[in-house]
């Protein structure tokens, strides 16, 4: 079927190329069909329930900002109550905020009642808290008025330092950080990719084809996703990942196809025959690889997490389009270009790179391995297992905003860091959303009394719950902010969250008849997310491993091949996990990579890496094993087939791995620690997979298995069209 589709495209090249371009244009235009806001993602667990309670209100959300007020005299020991400069600046700030018409509400400060709640424990710093008022269409104007007010007060009181951090300012800092990081990644990775392709092909035209197909594939995918995003939540982080995966698989598949066409042309075949052979071999491997990636991504749906739904749909869509372009428009382009694909050669590279040749280096390595497969395989496997050892103590913990970015990158993040020292949890307080089961307003005397009792529970919590505790009505619900001890997402903060959920709230709000409450916030949301992901991870692993096994078994008519491939992939992924834990959780190489360890690894990263790496690494295994199987079908001795298959595929696999490794290495230079983790983990796993696994472990395993690698269990041999091994039945020698 694949050969038939590719053959039709090569014969009707104009129609195939026009059809693909029309598909891209229609996909891009489809983005205009959807109107209104996109689908909203709901966080898992209790935090998600609290989020839904607020979103059900027509009045918007509760947006709280905080301003830390300190003396610039670092050596000063005057308390806030005795410092006229601090008190004057505080009074000026409160007056300026209230002077902006309707911009703020629920202002709290050290000059109000219960002033001790807004004064730090050492008595030298003050805090002003307030809500940025709605309605939603006037929120931006109100927030701008708040920022201007803080700046004006700062100018009038240069001897005092004002530092603002809160819901909007920190969210804005994170979004700007992500935007800047992704822009830097794109600006660096695209020229780097083009440079590697030029070195690989030695020709501007040949190097441009993979980029052209990848770009049109990604453009079509994002056009469709604009429409799909009205049904499935899709955020900016998912967009970046889909872009990365789309470019990676698009370039990989083009490399596989172009390399095989060059090889067949070098063997003396005409363009049409070279394309036919390529479609039957590399085209088959591309489809199998693409299906494996898509199947693996579907496993993320078992987590039940909304943010993974958009990522799954986007990845399946972009990979499916990459496969479609590889077996339709790519053969048409190559048929139209013919030998002109190697025009516009690069000096000193063109002549050497035009001919498709076996890799002498990787061929010698593979031959040395098959001579002593036990020694080579055992040594490499032990080395990877040693690298994986730190993963046994991995601690999944999301980075707080203050830990995600290094100092000096964001004013708001630096302000939150300082605020955390003086008022722990104030900038990232827990959000207790209170509603009523009968749908009436929760702003009642009973609820207000219960909230007041929270102050007493905080005082008796041993420091787990902190001040200032504030409450504000949002529509028919009340939103209560309770600062928690700890570094927002660390074990101390998790224990404080448990104190709030399990002890303080049941004896206060829990005694109010008809009251319903749920806790969200920057501690609760990642805590509930991590619990959900950890609970569903075994299901995801089982689904991916099971379906990948079946797909590879059908592809290669063998049960030992998929089993060996799965085990080898698990080794490379495990080694990457271990290095991640050793570097980021253990705090090693901090100065080299430019991060500050917070003692954990981002909770979603291991599962995400497993899904993506398991799918993408199958590209290499399927491509290499398909070349080995071709030689086996031609009657080549098993060990020679392994050496020849690895030698002939080494160039394109090394090139594809080099591109992906280079792109992910760029992520290690970005500011957010999450991107550094993603970059190091993915780059290292791909590097290991393309070198140690491909060149040592795979040939060692294949040489030890010999003919047994291609045998199905006895009961499967009776299936129509299935041979027991490449050395028996129809097809031998073809």
Image: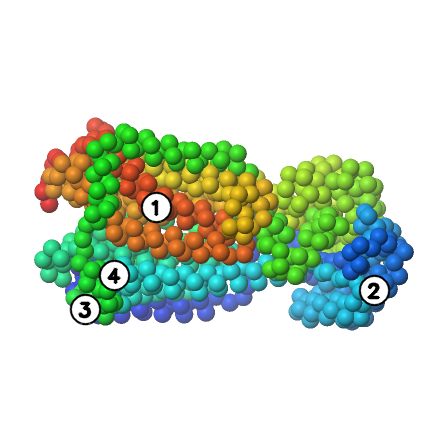
Judged by depth in the image, the label closer to the viewer, 3 or 4, is 4
Separation of marks 3 and 1 at Cα, in angstroms? 32 Å
> For mark 1, what is the residue?
617
Separation of marks 1 and 4 at Cα, in angstroms? 22 Å
Point 36% across, 64% down: residue: 215
Q: Position of residue 646 (x, y in %)?
A: 23, 44
> For mark 3, what is the residue?
340
> For mark 4, what is the residue?
201
Horizontally, residue 165 falls left or right of residue 600, namely right
Q: Secondary structure at mark 1?
A: helix
Name, please, the residue furthest toward the front. 75
Residues at discs 3 and 1 in contact (Cβ within 8 Å): no
Tell which of 483 and 305 is nearer to you: 483
> For mark 2, what is the residue?
89
Q: Where, by quadrant of the figure, is residue 570 drawn?
A: top left
Q: Residues within 10 Å of mark 1 (few under 14, many from 20)?
A: many
Q: Position of residue 488 (x, y in %)?
A: 66, 46
Separation of marks 2 and 1 at Cα, in angstroms? 59 Å
The mark that comes first in sequence, 2 or 4, is: 2
Q: Secondary structure at mark 3?
A: helix
The mark that comes first in sequence, 3 or 4, is: 4
The mark that comes first in sequence, 2 or 3, is: 2
Horizontally, residue 235 falls left or right of residue 247, namely right
Q: Residues within 10 Å of mark 3 (few under 14, many from 20)?
A: few
Judged by depth in the image, the label closer to the viewer, 1 or 4, is 4
Point 47% across, 49% down: residue: 678
Q: Where, by quadrant of the figure, is residue 158 drawn?
A: bottom right
Separation of marks 2 and 3 at Cα, in angstroms? 74 Å
Horizontally, residue 540 falls left or right of residue 175, namely left
Q: Secondary structure at mark 4?
A: helix
Q: Secondary structure at mark 2?
A: helix
The mark that comes first in sequence, 2 or 1, is: 2
């Amino acid at each position: 079927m694949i050969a038939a589709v590719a053959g039709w495209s090569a014969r009707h090249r104009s129609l195939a190329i026009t059809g693909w371009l029309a598909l891209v244009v229609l996909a891009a235009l489809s983005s205009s069909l959807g109107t209104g806001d996109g689908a909203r993602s709901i966080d898992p667990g209790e935090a998600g329930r609290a989020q839904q309670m607020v979103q059900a209100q027509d009045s918007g959300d509760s947006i709280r900002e905080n301003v830390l007020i300190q003396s610039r005299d670092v050596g000063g020991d005057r308390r806030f109550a005795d410092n006229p400069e601090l008190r004057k600046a505080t009074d000026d700030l409160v007056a300026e905020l209230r002077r902006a018409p309707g911009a703020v509400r629920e202002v709290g400060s050290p000059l109000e009642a219960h002033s001790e709640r807004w004064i730090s424990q050492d008595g030298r710093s003050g805090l002003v808290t307030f809500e940025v008022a709605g309605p939603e269409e006037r929120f931006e104007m109100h927030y701008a008025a708040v920022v201007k007010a803080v700046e004006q007060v700062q100018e009038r009181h240069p001897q005092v330092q004002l530092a603002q951090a809160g819901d909007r300012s920190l969210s804005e800092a994170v979004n700007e950080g992500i935007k800047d990081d992704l822009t830097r990644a794109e600006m660096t990775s695209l020229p780097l990719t083009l440079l590697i392709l030029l070195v690989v092909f030695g020709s501007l035209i040949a190097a441009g084809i993979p980029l052209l197909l990848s770009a049109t594939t990604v453009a079509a995918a994002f056009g469709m996703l604009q429409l799909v995003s009205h049904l499935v939540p899709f955020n900016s982080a998912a967009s970046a990942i889909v872009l990365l995966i789309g470019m990676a698989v698009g370039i990989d598949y083009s490399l596989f196809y172009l390399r095989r066409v060059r090889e067949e042309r070098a063997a003396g075949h005409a363009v049409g025959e070279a394309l036919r052979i390529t479609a039957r071999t590399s085209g088959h491997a591309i489809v199998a690889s693409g299906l494996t990636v898509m199947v693996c991504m579907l496993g993320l749906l078992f987590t039940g997490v909304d943010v993974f739904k958009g990522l799954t749909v986007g990845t399946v869509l972009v990979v499916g389009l990459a496969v479609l372009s590889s077996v339709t428009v790519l053969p048409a382009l190559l048929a139209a270009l013919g030998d002109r694909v190697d025009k516009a050669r690069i000096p000193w590279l063109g002549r050497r790179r035009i001919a498709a040749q076996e890799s002498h280096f990787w061929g010698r390595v593979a031959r040395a391995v098959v001579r002593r497969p036990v020694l080579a395989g055992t040594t490499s496997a032990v080395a990877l297992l040693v690298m994986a050892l730190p993963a046994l103590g991995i601690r999944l913990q999301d980075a707080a905003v203050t830990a995600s970015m290094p100092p000096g990158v964001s004013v708001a993040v630096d302000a939150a860091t300082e605020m955390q020292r003086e008022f722990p949890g104030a900038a990232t307080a827990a959000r207790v959303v209170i509603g009523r089961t009968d749908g009436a307003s929760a702003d009642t005397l009973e609820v207000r009394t219960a909230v007041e009792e929270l102050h007493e529970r905080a005082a008796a919590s041993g420091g787990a719950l902190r001040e200032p505790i504030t409450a504000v009505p949002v529509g028919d619900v009340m939103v209560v902010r309770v600062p928690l001890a700890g570094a927002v997402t660390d074990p101390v903060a998790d224990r404080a969250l448990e104190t709030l959920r399990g002890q303080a709230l049941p004896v206060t709000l829990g005694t109010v008849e008809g009251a319903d409450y749920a806790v969200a916030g920057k501690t609760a949301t990642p805590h509930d997310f991590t619990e959900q992901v950890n609970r569903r991870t075994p299901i995801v692993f089982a689904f991916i491993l099971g379906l990948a096994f079946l797909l590879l078994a059908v592809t290669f008519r063998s049960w030992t091949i998929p089993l060996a491939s799965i085990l080898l992939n698990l080794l490379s992924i495990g080694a990457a996990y271990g290095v991640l834990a050793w570097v980021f959780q253990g705090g090693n190489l901090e100065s080299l990579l430019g991060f500050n360890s917070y003692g954990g690894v981002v909770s979603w990263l291991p599962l995400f890496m497993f899904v993506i790496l398991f799918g993408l690494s199958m590209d290499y295994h399927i491509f290499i094993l398909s070349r080995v199987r071709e030689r086996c079908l031609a009657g080549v001795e098993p060990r020679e087939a392994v050496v020849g298959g690895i030698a002939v595929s080494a160039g394109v696999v090394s090139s594809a791995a080099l591109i992906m490794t280079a792109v992910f290495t760029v992520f290690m230079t970005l500011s957010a620690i999450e991107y550094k983790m993603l970059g190091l983990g993915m780059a290292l796993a791909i590097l290991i997979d393309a070198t140690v696994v491909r060149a040592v472990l795979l040939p060692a395993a294949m040489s030890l298995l010999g003919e047994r690698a291609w045998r199905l269990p006895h009961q499967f041999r009776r299936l129509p069209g299935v041979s027991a091994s490449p050395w028996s039945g129809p097809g031998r020698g073809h």
